[in-house]
Image (cartoon, rainbow, N blue to C red):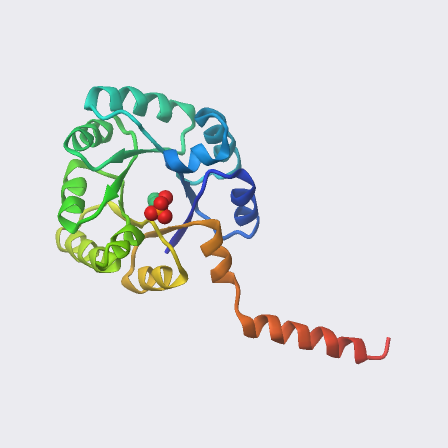
């Protein structure tokens, strides 16, 4: 399974990249807004650090306007993947992007049938938002399982990118289901690293090392 980091903070991206654990980056307008920087500056800097796919979201809501944004974003760096919302106009734009060779990440997906449409339109990635589904007392990961089953049934090339990941159990379940990608906030990546027995074990080894004659 590939790991993407879901952030627009360059320091978080650099740290995860240095650990060799990330294959790409996802951003969205909310994440970019938190940085206080311009969208272009943030994107270009991220693409200089990470050579894998970097998702950049359009903010238009009509197909024509989305396509203008998509072409401009794709022209910025070769590894940019254009993030498009799962609405009717968005599907039209996904289809045109596929015809023009622009990679897309279809975002704000909350059902397996939406995901089926995205695959038919030619999406490179589908992003089911599991945490937000859990938030309304439904099963986010159940949707991911359905999507994986459906995509396998029909051999779609669209990659399943588990998004809105909130905790390590989402990642564990995504990996067990065979999802292609999980995009995780920096905090969740660090939670995956940590284990209390690792910390206790290290502390004991270091204390015992002090007893070894030097
Ligand atoms: O990748 C989508 C993600 O950024 C949404 O996460 O936590 O805002 O639901 P969240």
Nearer to me, 81 or 101 = 81
Q: Position of residue 154 (x, y in %)?
A: 13, 51
x, y percent for residue 187: 48, 53
The picture places residue 145, in percent across and down from the top left corner, at: 21, 59
Q: Is residue 36 above or below residue 141?
A: above
Can residue 55 be seen at all in this image of the molecule? no
Question: Is residue 213 in view from this perspective?
Answer: yes
Extreme residue toward the right, this view: 214
Viewer-side residue, 32 vs 158: 32
168 on left or right of 157: right
Ligand 1 found in image quarter: top left
Q: Where is residue 200 in the image (x, y as percent from the top left)?
A: 61, 75
Q: Is 5 situated above or below 98?
A: below
User: From the image, which quarter does the C terminus lie in?
Assistant: bottom right
Name the residue at 24% across, 35% down: 85
Q: Relative to 73, is 174 above or below?
A: below
């Amino acid at each position: 399974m590939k790991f993407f980091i879901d952030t627009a903070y360059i320091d978080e991206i650099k740290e995860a990249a240095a650990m060799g654990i990330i294959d790409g980056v996802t951003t969205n307008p909310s994440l970019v807004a938190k940085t206080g920087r311009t969208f272009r500056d943030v994107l270009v800097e991220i693409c200089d650090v990470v050579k894998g796919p970097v998702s950049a979201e359009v903010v238009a809501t009509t197909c024509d306007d989305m396509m203008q944004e998509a072409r401009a974003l794709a022209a910025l760096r070769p590894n940019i993947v254009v993030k498009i919302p799962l609405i009717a106009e968005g599907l039209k734009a996904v289809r045109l992007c596929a015809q023009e060779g622009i990679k897309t990440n279809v975002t704000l997906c909350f059902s397996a049938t939406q995901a089926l449409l995205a695959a038919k339109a030619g999406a490179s990635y589908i992003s089911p938002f599991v945490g937000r589904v859990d938030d309304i007392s439904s099963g986010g990961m159940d949707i991911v399982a359905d999507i994986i089953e459906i995509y396998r049934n029909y051999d779609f090339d669209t990659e399943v990118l588990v998004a809105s990941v909130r905790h390590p159990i989402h990642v564990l379940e995504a990996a067990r289901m065979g999802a292609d990608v999980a995009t995780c906030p920096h905090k969740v990546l660090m939670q995956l690293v940590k284990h209390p027995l690792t910390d206790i074990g290290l502390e004991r080894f270091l204390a015992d090392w002090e007893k070894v004659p030097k």
